[in-house]
Amino acid sequence: MSKLGRIAKLGTLTTRVSGSYLGQQVAGLFQGEESRKASMRKLHLENAERIVDNLGALKGAAMKVGQAVAQVADSLDLPADARAVMGRLHDKAVPVPFEQVKSRIEAELGGSTESLFARLDPEPLGTASLGQVHAAQLKDGQEVVIKVLHAGVEEAIHSDLAALKAMLVGGRFLRRPKEEIDAWFDEIDTRLAEEIDYRKEAENTIAFRRLLAEEEGVIVPRVHEGWSTQRVLTLERLGGRPLSQFIATSTAAARQAAGVRLARTFFHLFYWHRACHADPHPGNYLFMPDGRIGLIDFGCVRYFDLEWVAHYGGCAWYTKVGDKERVMEHALGMGALVRRDADSEDALWALCRAIGVPFRGGDYTVGGPDDDAHEQITRAMPRVMVNPTLRAPRELVFLHRSLGGIYSINKQLKPSYDWGELLRESYRKTLVDSGRSASGL
């Protein structure tokens, strides 16, 4: 689809979604309370269906941002059935015909695929919002995967994002201060611009392979730079199984090992290296029979300022030990609290306590019968979302997307561990690196 066609399609979608809510606002003036609520629930569901159907067909930035929204749908003002519909965006990408992919590879690498590869599988391993992946073999016998950027994505990314922002704001999905929403979308725009440059992803992959070299049982693929460009990325093909197959075939011990490794990797990357593997979809992990894990897709990564990590870690640690006053001090430092007032602090404290449930002390089984962290967060979030004194700093957009993704995967793996101790050892490293005292930990 041409850029003009995409703009027209997204513009029409934005008009329909926004207009439907405006119409319901007028109709609601003549409805009773229960009827008004029922009409709004029905409208949310209809618009969720419209969004999924349209973004799934468009691919690109529109679908990518829609997927990110779906991952945090619990924080939106949507009923459960509409959130479930938004979740279908992860399954909507339609494969690109192989001949188009083959032509793009040849144009980028400057030769025929027959001269470049001993084998190139026509069936894709996967199709995502921004690219498609095929298995191949180099002439020397090395097994690789080739990631190919969808045609037209680079030209449409900024207009897609602007149209989706207008739709989410106009459709009242995001009811936050304008400057906060602008910061979120600027953050998303920055990350997406990096994600469609496979040279940047190659650099990220090499960097994270180095950062995680000492992380036992964690594997990052090698980059084949001679077969990679801005739009084509060739990587070592890792062994392992996708999450669903691993869960179905693995031992409890292997699932335990994999779940702990996922969490330790997240904590060590963030607190030790101030970095984040920020695309936590289950398809970006591979699982070995013994519980080792492979991390793939480093298009979306985020680096953080040391001072900000220290404040974030302070919020986490002092939530664990029950020190509300210290949490608020660090919340001010990281930009989550604009000013001190009792209502805002109570709302933020309730959310911090909900997020901190697994870290309070002793072994805690994620996804176990007593794991109610998700439910507590869902109950605490509405009060935070309507409070103008509280903010979600732009750093949180991808950090909490990653943390939420790890938690979601571990709810299926069900590892049991002393997560509070993991937080303590990780935060201690940040304190030392920032020149602060860690004697109280």
Image (spheres, rainbow, N blue to C red):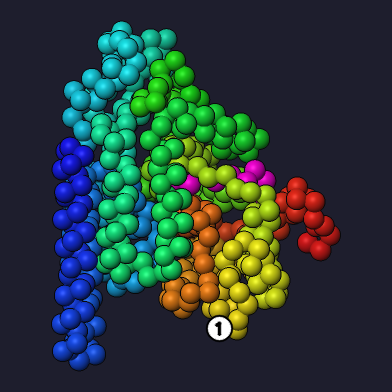
Is 273 in the magenta? yes
Please name the residue shown 60% across and 84% down the image: 342
Please name the residue shown 18% across and 77% down the image: 24
Residue for badge 1 = 343
Sort mark 1 into few (<14), some (14-19) or many (20+) by Cα contacts within 10 Å.
few
The location of residue 435, given as percent across then percent down, is 80, 51
Compared to residue 302, the image places residue 181 above or below, namely below
Please name the residue shown 37% across and 48% down the image: 244
Q: Quadrant of the C terminus?
A: bottom right
Judge left or right: residue 355 versus residue 129.
Answer: right
Judge left or right: residue 413 versus residue 209.
Answer: left
Compared to residue 220, the image places residue 92 above or below, namely below
**Range of the magenta residues?**
271-280
The location of residue 413, given as percent across then percent down, is 47, 54
- Residue furthest to the bottom: 32
The location of residue 322, given as percent across then percent down, is 68, 75
Q: Quadrant of the N terminus?
A: top left
Q: Mark 1 falls on what kind of element?
A: helix
Relative depth, front residue between 236 and 12: 12
Compared to residue 290, the image places residue 339 above or below, namely below
Relative depth, front residue between 387 and 112: 387
Residue 351 visible from this viewpoint: no
Specify the quadrant of the image occupied by residue 361: bottom right
Is 332 in the magenta? no
Relative depth, front residue between 21 and 243: 21
- Residue furthest to the front: 179
Please name the residue shown 18% across and 68% down the image: 19
As shown in the figure, which amino acid type bears the numbered disc 1? Answer: Asp
